[in-house]
Image (spheres, grey):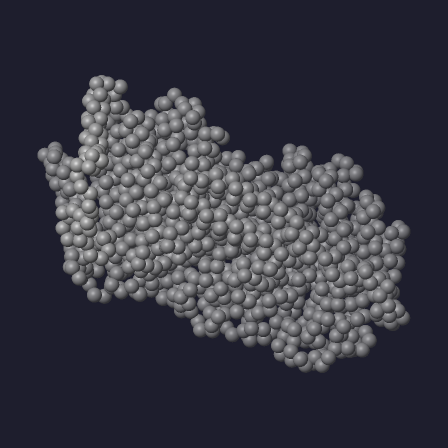
Amino acid sequence: MIASELIWLIFLLPVFSFIIVSLFIRPSVKPTSKIAGYITITAISASLVLSLWTLLTVMAEPKHELAVPDFSWLTVGDLTIRIGLMIDSLTAVMLVVVTVVSLMVQIYSQGYMHGDPGYHRYYAWMSLFTASMLGVIMANSLLLIFFFWELVGLCSYLLIGFWFHRPAAANAAKKAFVVTRLGDFGFLAAILLLYTNTGTFNIPELHEMAITGVLAGTTLTWAAIGIFAGAIGKSAQFPLHVWLPDAMEGPTPVSALIHAATMVAAGVFLVARTFPLFVNSATAVTIVAVIGAFTAIFAATMGLVMNDMKRVVAYSTISQLGYMMLGLGAAGLALRQEGHVTLELAKAAAAIGIFHLFNHAFFKALLFLGAGSVNHATNTFDMRQMGGLRKVMPWTYATFVIGALSLAGIWPLSGFWSKDEILAVTWDTQRVLFTLVMITVLMTAFYIFRVVFLTFSGQYRGSDPGSHGQEHDHTTHLHESSPVMVAPMVILAILAIISGFWNITGSFDAFMGHGETRSFASGLFGIFTHPLPWIALLVAGLGIFLAYAIYGAKWLSAERIGHIFRPLYIIFSRKYWFDELYENVIVKLILLKWVFAALEKIDTKVVDGAVNGLANTVRTIYRIALLNGIFDILQRVDGTKIEKANGVIKEPNKNWWQVDGIVNVMANGVTASGEALKKTQTGQLQLYGLVIGLGVVAIILVLYFAG
Amino acid sequence: MSVGLEHYLILSAALFSIGFYGALAKKNAIIILMCIELMINAVNIAMAAFSRYSVPVLLTGQVFIIFIIVVAAAEVAVGLAIIMNIYRSRETTETDKIDLMKW
Amino acid sequence: MNLQLFIPELTLAIFAIAVILLDLFVQRKGVLAGVSVAGLVISAGFTLTMWGSEPQTIFNNMLAVDSFALFFKLLFTGIAILVILASVDYASKLTNLQGEYYALVLLSVLGMMLMAAATELISIYVALGLTSLSLCALVGFLKDSKSSEAALKYFLLSAMVSAVLLFGMALVFGVTGETQLSKIAQVIQAMPLTNITDNPALVLGVVLLIVGFGFKIAAVPFHMWVPDVYEGAPTPITAYLSVGSKAAGFAVILRIFSSAFGLPEWLSLNWGMLFAVLAAISMTLGNVVALPQTNIKRMLGYSSIAQAGYLMVGLATVGILPTADVLGQSAILFFLASYTVTNLGAFIAIIAISNKTNSDLIQDFSGMIRRAPGLALALTLCLVSLIGMPPAAGFMAKFYIFSAGVHSGLLWLVIIAVLNSVISAYYYLRVVKVMWFGEPTSTEKVFSSGALRFSLFITSIGVLLLGILPGLVMKLTEAASKMLAFLP
Amino acid sequence: MATDYIYIALFLLAAILFVVTTLLIPVTLRFLKIIPHNPTPVKGSPFECGVETIGKTWVQFNLRYYLYALVFLIIDVLVVFLYPWAVNIRHLGLTGLIEMLILLTIVTVGYIYAWKKGALEWK
């Protein structure tokens, strides 16, 4: 039995380490000392112990829930906001995942970040991130979750842009921040919607209402969709997936912790957390399932062709997150087919997706750390510059292969078990999606082993790696990484093997709330009484074999194949022209039309009508002003003027506008109209007076005709 | 027919509008200042008339007017100072030439 | 009538005169700042002693001494102290005019205090005059061409608007025959009116009042002066304008509209909706035009227009909710408090930086995180708070005022507001990006005086405190807003 | 009532007639050749208007005048308050006197200030 104060401590310890490192260590100690790392590691390992303790306690509980006394944070008129923790099986599992991976990454970083000028800053942000991630997991009210949700986004912004002297990093940071904020907007809207309809932010209460049908119909659907929008942003699902690959500009441990194991999984967690809201709306669940499945295959295709080791893993992350979403959605559909939805069942339905999250966290973090370790030796992520590293870095090779096998879903590694469950439930509910993800299984096995063979087998193709590093300025020669980096990888590898066993006996499902248990042996082998696992294994094996045939044994030449599938290859490698699409087409078509129309209207109706009779000078000024405005828009829209438009920032400025995707559409549109309106501020005192006068007249007219 | 409240109000409204127009149409800062004074005095007329017609026994309106006059005087003082200032730095008081800051 | 209720104002007046006289006879001008800060602290102390006592009125019902007024008096004295601390470096440049500078600041604070306390049209007008005249003088204080141009614009426009305001007052007085806000309320509620078109004179008067104070709070379409004046004025004064006169304007609006025009329904609903529309326009225009700005003072000018828009959401709520429900008022007060600390902090950081770089262009803030980590960090915090991101004060303020809006059924407005705060993230973050990721224009560090760093520290603490423990201040604001129900 | 306006109308009429006739007389005389017509520059020049103006007719006033105007204005406004106070000084009694003294001190401070700052010097 664990005391509630200790549970609070889980979240508070990283906060303390953040405060200590940022306020006291960073100004005083010079970046070569490792003190900051030790502080952070101690704090996080302490909270890891506490989280394990919590997990055990929760397991012991009959209803797998822990009541933690909450307290009122502030009272606004009739609304009281209470801060409290929600400790159930979901939280407990996530706690363990986050603290374990975070601890591993922190230890690894001791080696990886050593000697970096921003060493202390790195650990400060890392602690802050861990703290806020734990906050997201443990919060019991949507508002609080949003609070930490934003903090998590902020940390990821700061950590992606950690090497801000690289414009690419700076822009990736910006892009990630803004794109995810688009999703967050939906999330916030959903929160407000729920609050206006129910008057509460408290999640358990919302669950009750959703299940009992107090909250239903379009409101529920829209709320669910809004929440899912937030999840899409954070978990880089289909329309908003553009930021995650660029986010790889950050330090590799950051990618491992934030953009593989925890933060991107927060989207999945959010959906799981609010799952009772989803299951009661067919639309919502279907959307989740479809988006998930589509993202899975969509990202996998792009993963096939990337030459940057880290980006392949990044795309595989997106695709795996798609799996989790699919798992959730399909489980929800299955639940709906059975009918009779209870709160326990609804919560338990999330088990499948969460189980995959649980396993994925370990092997994906492992893969990233492996990539980092390779980069540490070769100073590059470009796989065309690698090869033959198996002999040089055996540990990295072994662990990486384990991770790859687990990702490919090979029996009996962890990836196999969770993926199998997802496939099974999809098979029961949605055959179309099932075929999609089956294809994805093939691609997954192929691209990850393409990485393995390109990197570790054959001959070393890289130039003399003594040149200046991509991430590290100190020169290196090919070598196995230091033990401090290898140890975490080994631990993660072990986890990647065994973490799947938890549910062999069905105890994970049982722990999540519902499911019958079976004996270990029957679970381990009895699974092959169904045809599905066979198919899955065969497909995965085929993928690995193809990879071996092409990149390992070179029976087939990659060039020839690439030639045969040239169109596909181009499409994939250009990422379906998504960024270009976002940038040009939408801007040109939509923007041009409406901004133009709007400005015309202003010019003719308001200005002429009002200014007539009064001082002519004013009118001409205003006219010129608006014409300039429209002119600006024309130039801006075909991009010829963007640099000048904000000569604000000298060098980075250009890049700030190349944040592509939806951002550009909005930003350009708004700035364009801003430029236009700006011109109405002519500095002519009397125009200002005139506007006041017109304002009065307008108000009176409105009052009389509308009021 | 007798001269009633509305006559005063019409007068004050007319003066007010004239002042406002002048304030917007004239270019010389000092003339604009005068126009503003005109607006304020139009208000004074209205005040006096209201006070006389709606609360004959009290002097509220008149007292109000006294304060308005005082504040207006102070306003003129500050205004003239500022205009002198800008004349010193720009050698002009034409408001349409005073647009260093815009956009 | 007992004068000791008037002591805070008296203290300020005496100290202002004392500063002027000292300036004539003392050679070491550094003393003056100390004296004026002392005066402000003393009067704030007197104000504190009155907190929690029964609401009373002095000068036969011309001024009210209730916790609403006291709240604002504390706010204003706090603002002035910070502004003076921030001006110390700045004022030392203008050697022989420091006395006037500090005296004018004190006088304008006095005016604002009176504005917050006034419950009667005449005193409101006089207080307004005092405030805006001393502010005009301060805006034109540098005497260079930019500053004096700003002063001219501010002066002529505010004079124009004050004439309009007077006309409105005249109309209201004419229709009701009263200048007491409470009496006006009684008369209006006694009138057999059901519709806005029944008494055009009254409605016109109300509209003109809205114009007059809309100018003070920089609401579109009475906002055009803001960017120019903000750009031209001495930076401490810009900071002062952006928080002080805005807060004062809202104080008077709240006082007038929730006591004099709070009822009947047909009136309050209409001005409520009017404010709602103005709010939507203001926040949109402010945010959109702020995007392409290159001068940070100008950008903050537009952003303050946008913030006025958010604040007016609260005013709309005040109009729509029943008078007993003071959610809107309290939300506005809280927003004002947090906006004050945030914006002051931002401006103080800017003062510190541009004292060194002699430039307000955003591009010259490039790489500040390496030249002045403390300043850049504080400025980042303030900008984050302006965006309205947790854990800064801005988030709670926006959340509070938006929830008030939702509570009064203005969902459309709140949605517009949220969209706007998404837009606003761009231009605020642009500055952050330049400071953190830009290449520094020069390598030399930026140092600032102790007074500046102290005031910056205070504001940053305030931002965090209001963001993390808003409950403390919200109690005050609710207590203060309850007073608006009390009519002398 | 209307009769009052008739008087006004009559006055108006008379005034207009006067102006028109005075304008017409010389014209008619010229028309009847009663007065000769041989203009000379001397005749053309402004009649009985002192010396002819030299330089621009539009003279700008010296800025200093404005300065005096300011000081005068401020102190002059005092009267607005002094007068009503003086009218019923008895009724206002001691407090009124004190308040007026406060006002006077403030104005005096302003005067001293202007003096010390040399606003009254003609520099």
Nearer-the-camera pick, A423 or C173: C173
Vertical order, A546 against A5 (above or below): below
User: Which percent across, then down, holds residue D44?
Assistant: 20, 48
Residue C182 position by quadrant? top left
Vertical order, A480 against C184 (above or below): below
The residue located at (29%, 33%) in the rendering is: B12
User: Which percent across, then down, holds residue D27?
Assistant: 22, 36
Q: How many marks?
A: 0
Nearer-the-camera pick, A100 or A407: A407
Image quadrant in which the N terminus of chain D is located: top left
User: Which percent across, then down, holds residue A74?
Assistant: 48, 44
Q: Residue furthest left?
A: D90
The residue located at (37%, 41%) in the rendering is: C213
Nearer-the-camera pick, C378 or C298: C298
Vertical order, D97 against A123 (above or below): above
The residue located at (45%, 59%) in the rendering is: C295
User: Which percent across, then down, holds residue A590?
Assistant: 64, 48
Residue C360 position by quadrant? bottom left
Inspect this view and state whether residue C357 appears: yes
The residue located at (55%, 75%) in the rendering is: A32
